[in-house]
Image (tube, rainbow, N blue to C red):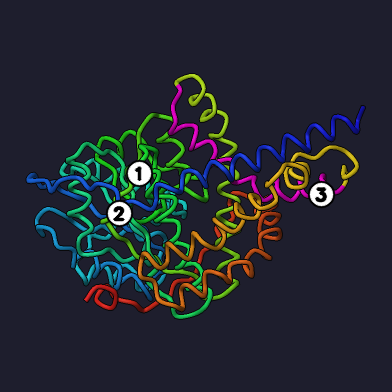
Amino acid sequence: MEKVILSVFTNLAQVLVFLTGLFYLALSFRGFWKIPMPRAAFGKLRFALLLPAHNEEKVIGFSVESLFKIKYPRELFDVFVAADHCGDGTSAIAANLGAIVFDHSGPGLKAGKGRALKWASDKILSMKKYDALCYFDADSLAHPGFLEAMNNQLNAGAGAVQGRQLAKNTNCWLARILASSHIVTNRFFQRPKQALGLSATLHGKGMCFSAPVAGRFPWDEECLTEDLEMQMRLIRAGVRIVWAEDAIVYDEEPVTLRQYVRRSVRWTRGSLDTARKHLFSLCLRAVKKGDPRAFEGAVYCAQTYRFGLVTVTAALIWFTKDSFNFLVWLYAFLPGVEFTMKALAILPLVLYPAVALVLEKAGPELVFAYFLQPVLGILRLPVFIAGILRGTSFWGRTEHSSQVAITDLVP
């Protein structure tokens, strides 16, 4: 009896893994076609641009400078920096460049990005002078056309918008691998979701919320992945997150494996907490209201458990090899399925990335770097385990040092 129960569980896990992969593969086909952009808006909204920063003196100047170089009426936007318990020159550099600096330190103010975001957002909203808030990281850069694109989206009715994320540094193989992933994700994940009316994925920088949305949904002070937590909370509330392909934000990628692992562990821990808080409610909304955004949000949220599920499923297939196994049967016995299964493996792992990188005119070094991703795959199991074992107080801050200006990327 125990063996039967184990076999049933094993096959259910296999079906779940297979259907999830098939779902996102089918979704990605829409990425081959362009998506319509909203018309240029005549009305100009007023924006507050907010950067939380903790000891970022090496990069904060480049980030603030990029915001002031945005091509939008200067009187219609202000730059704020939430200096979160800074002990270096972050505040002075930002202030000297013209940013309004909020000092998030002292008695009663505990350090943390989510806390700094919530505290600074509340202060800005209390001024009642901005139509929308845009969020960046201290290491990110904004394209000169960022606010114009966001203005068009908000005037078209959007309440929450995510810009297109690209890498600002490609000076080593690790950064190039991650940079190439952004290109593929934009083309075959974010674009299809936008075209099909689903919600975009928030990335923590290049985000824009209307003042009513920002006021209604304060940032979570405890979650290590406050962007993912906000994404799931918005979807649960029926607020669609629009993806603005022409609102570009450039992010700094890790340049050492130590940086990459620390960041990945933090993301894993935060993603597990977000899934615990929101996965059931997303499933419930998807069923009760027939909400496709909630359904996709639930599937995406559940991907947190994907690596663990795949690992356990593979072990169970071996353990129950003498019993019926769905994937083994599908591969071995159905006519023509061997070729189909190989095609389904090659398509998303080889052909799709190559097509996306060529269509986006990526350099040969990025095309080559993408296919080095299996090297990083070796780290997934220890990262997943470390993410489970880490507490929610673990931050794992990534050191930022890329000296790249917006003029280096957009002449």
Give the magenta part as a residue range: 290-318
What is the CA distance from the residue labelled 2 to the residue labelled 1?
Answer: 9 Å
Q: What's the distance in space between the residues labelled 1 and 3, CA to CA?
A: 37 Å
Task: For residue 108, say whether it is visible.
Answer: no
Image-quadrant location for residue 144: bottom left
In terms of sequence position, does the residue under pointer 1 or pointer 3 come before the other?
1
Is the residue marked by circle 3 packed among few (<14), some (14-19), or many (20+) residues within 10 Å? few
**Viewer-side residue, 94 vs 42:** 42
Question: Which residue sits at x=34%, y=51%?
Answer: 33
Q: Position of residue 390 (x, y in %)?
A: 66, 53
- In this view, the residue farthest toward the top is 288
Ranked by sequence position, the earlier of labels 3 and 2 is 2
The reply to whether the magenta stretch includes residue 1 is no
Residue in the picture at 21% in, 53% down: 149
Residue where numbered disc 1 is placed: 194
- Locate residue 126, reporting x and y percent: 23, 40
- Locate residue 199 relative to residue 380 in the image: left or right: left
Residue type pointed to by label 1: Gln
Query: As shown in the figure, which amino acid type bears the numbered disc 2?
Result: Glu
Label 2 secondary element: strand
Task: Give residue 69's position: percent from left, percent from top.
Answer: 18, 68
Q: Which residue is mark 2?
A: 245
Q: Residue furthest left?
A: 42
- Disc number at residue 105? none
* Quadrant into which the N terminus falls: top right
- Residue 158 visible within the image: yes
Q: How many marks?
A: 3
* Residue, disc 3: 315
Q: CA distance from mark 3 to mark 2?
A: 41 Å
